[in-house]
Amino acid sequence: MGRTYRRVLLKLSGEALMGNLGYGIDPIVVQDIAKEIAEVVAAGIQVAIVVGGGNIFRGVKAASAGMDRATADYIGMIATVMNAMTLQDALEQMEIPTRVQTAIAMQEVAEPYIRRRAMRHLEKGRVVVFGAGSGNPFFTTDTTAALRAAEIDAEAIFKGTKVDGVYDRDPKVYPDARLYRTLTYAHVLAHDLRVMDSTAIALCKENDIPIIVFNLSVRGNIGRVLKGESVGTTVGGFCDIS
């Protein structure tokens, strides 16, 4: 058993919400994620979430196809709000009070992002889902996760992926790829391991926020990592490869 956390930020990709579908949102997957988060909140851990929008719209891909990059990114931000509202609904069906805060004003469906209000919600045991990224084009939701984690004084970022953690090379291509248990920020940047984008890594390094990368598709993993069990790869310590 590792450390126990008081306040954490969970980073979910939009793709995580679509499960095995090729597009959109799988309600069963969302319900499973919400159930695990609910168990963690019931244990007294304060949880904030940043969710991506790649299951609905990916700005970079659209820009590469000829769309103006800033416009494509704004559309992607709106997609994240759809995912945030979906998570909110699933959590509240499990009687976990949840607030969606957006970096782009959408007062009919969500609160504006206000740091002190977000922290107050967390203190009252509410889950806060941050939508619309940082509100600025050219920034990823990974960078948003690092930024919001620093702003709300989160003790760690937990990034759910489709693999067990960070490997020295692609495990889907190389069966002998080795899993890192711990990594330094510098090693991630120097070897371009793509845990998160370089801006996000730099923000986490500057603010001493560890990043725990884990396999979201393994049932129960959200609860395990948020409760401090040794799962996946921790970025922020020394380098240890298994």
Image (spheres, rainbow, N blue to C red):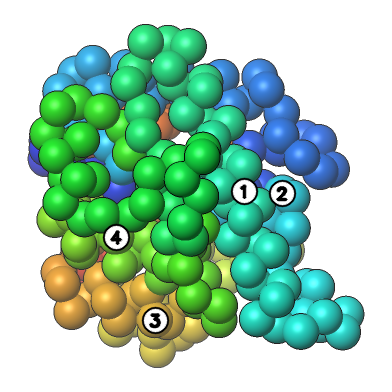
Sequence-wise, the earlier of marks 2 and 1 is: 1
Viewer-closest of 219 and 19: 19
Does the rendering let one see residue 103? yes
Q: Is residue 241 left or right of residue 133?
A: left
Q: Quadrant of residue 75?
A: bottom right
Q: Which residue is mark 3?
A: 199
Q: Is residue 203 left or right of residue 36?
A: left
Q: Amino acid at mark 1?
A: Gly
Label 3, label 1: how far apart the Cα atoms are: 20 Å
Q: Which residue is mark 2?
A: 55
From this view, report whether residue 5 is shown above or below residue 97.
below
Q: Amino acid at mark 4?
A: Arg
Label 2, label 4: how far apart the Cα atoms are: 22 Å
Sequence-wise, the earlier of marks 3 and 2 is: 2
Viewer-closest of 220 and 133: 133
Residue 177 in picture, x, y percent from top left: 57, 63
Label 2, label 1: how far apart the Cα atoms are: 5 Å
Q: Tell me the residue at 52%/23% (across/down).
A: 89
Q: Residue furthest front?
A: 108
Q: Are marks 4 and 3 in contact (CB under 8 Å)?
A: no
Q: Which residue is mark 1?
A: 14
From this view, report whether residue 103 is shown above or below residue 29.
below
Residue 104 in picture, x, y percent from top left: 48, 60
Q: Quadrant of residue 208?
A: bottom left
Label 4, label 3: how far apart the Cα atoms are: 13 Å
Q: Is residue 179 left or right of residue 153?
A: right
Q: Which residue is mark 4?
A: 148
Label 1, label 4: how far apart the Cα atoms are: 18 Å
